[in-house]
Amino acid sequence: MQDLCGNIQDLSLQHLGSQVVALGLSCCKILALIAFICIETIMECSPCEGLYFFEFVSCSAFVVTGVLLILFSLNLHMRIPQINWNLTDLVNTGLSTFFFFIASIVLAALNHKTGAEIAAVIFGFLATAAYAVNTFLAVQKWRVSLRQQSANDYIRARTESRDVDSRPEIQRLDT
C-alpha cells in the first residue's frame, strides 16, 4: 500500500514538474515572440548583421521552445522515455539564454535608437532573464533526476546481486 501511495505521489510530482516547466517555457516563448515581432517591424538598417542575428536567435528560440512547450504541456514527453527530457530542457534554456544575451548586446551596440530596436533590445534582455531563471530551474531538476537515477541503479544492482548464487562451485560438484 505504501509503495502504491509513493508511486501515485511520484506521478503527481512529475505532472506538477512538467506543468512548472511548461509555465516557464510559455513565459520564455511569449518574450521571444514579442522580441521577434519588434525586430520584424524595423524597415531600414545600415549594418544589418546584428539585426539578422537577433532575428535568427529570437525566431529559433520561439520555435524550439514552442515544440518543447507542446511536449511538456500535453505530457507527450512521457511517451518517449529514451530521451533525457530534463537534459533537453537544460540544453535548450542554457543555449537560448546565451544566444539571447549575445544577440541583445550586439543589437544594443549597433542600435540606431529607433523605437522598434530599443523595444527589441529590452525584450531581448527580458527573454534572457526568463531563460536564465528557467536554466537555473532546469539545472536543479536535472540534478534531482541524476540522484534518483543513481539511487535506482544502486537498488537494481543490489537486487540483482541477491539473485546470483554466491557459491556456484557447490552446484557444479553436486550435479
Image (spheres, rainbow, N blue to C red):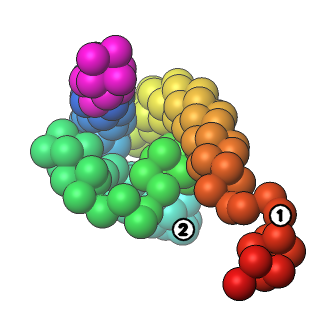
Q: Is residue 50 left or right of residue 83?
A: right
Judge whether 107 appears above or below 133 on screen: below
Q: Residues within 10 Å of mark 1 (few under 14, many from 20)?
A: few
Q: CA distance from mark 2 to mark 1?
A: 71 Å
Main SS class of the magenta portion in the image: helix
Instruction: Decide which of 55, 65 is in the foreground and name it.
Output: 65
Judge whether 58 appears above or below 19 on screen: below
Residue furthest toward the front? 174
Q: Position of residue 124 (x, y in %)?
A: 46, 38
Residue plotted at (54% across, 51% down): 87
Instruction: Decide which of 105, 58 is in the foreground and name it.
Output: 58
Q: What stretch of residues is rendered in magenta?
A: 1-11
Of badges 2 and 1, the one in the foreground is 1
The reply to whether residue 14 is visible in this rendering is: yes
Residue furthest toward the left? 74
Instruction: Decide which of 167, 12 is in the foreground and name it.
Output: 167
Q: How many marks?
A: 2
Amino acid identity at mark 1: Arg
**Does the magenta segment cover residue 5?**
yes
Tell me the tag on residue 167: 1
Residue plotted at (28% across, 53% down): 77
**Does the magenta segment cover residue 81?**
no
Q: Position of residue 112 (x, y in %)?
A: 50, 45
Element marked by disc 2 = helix
- Residue highlighted by disc 2: 49
2 or 1: tag closer to the N-terminus? 2
Q: Position of residue 80 (x, y in %)?
A: 30, 62
Residue plotted at (48% across, 45% down): 86
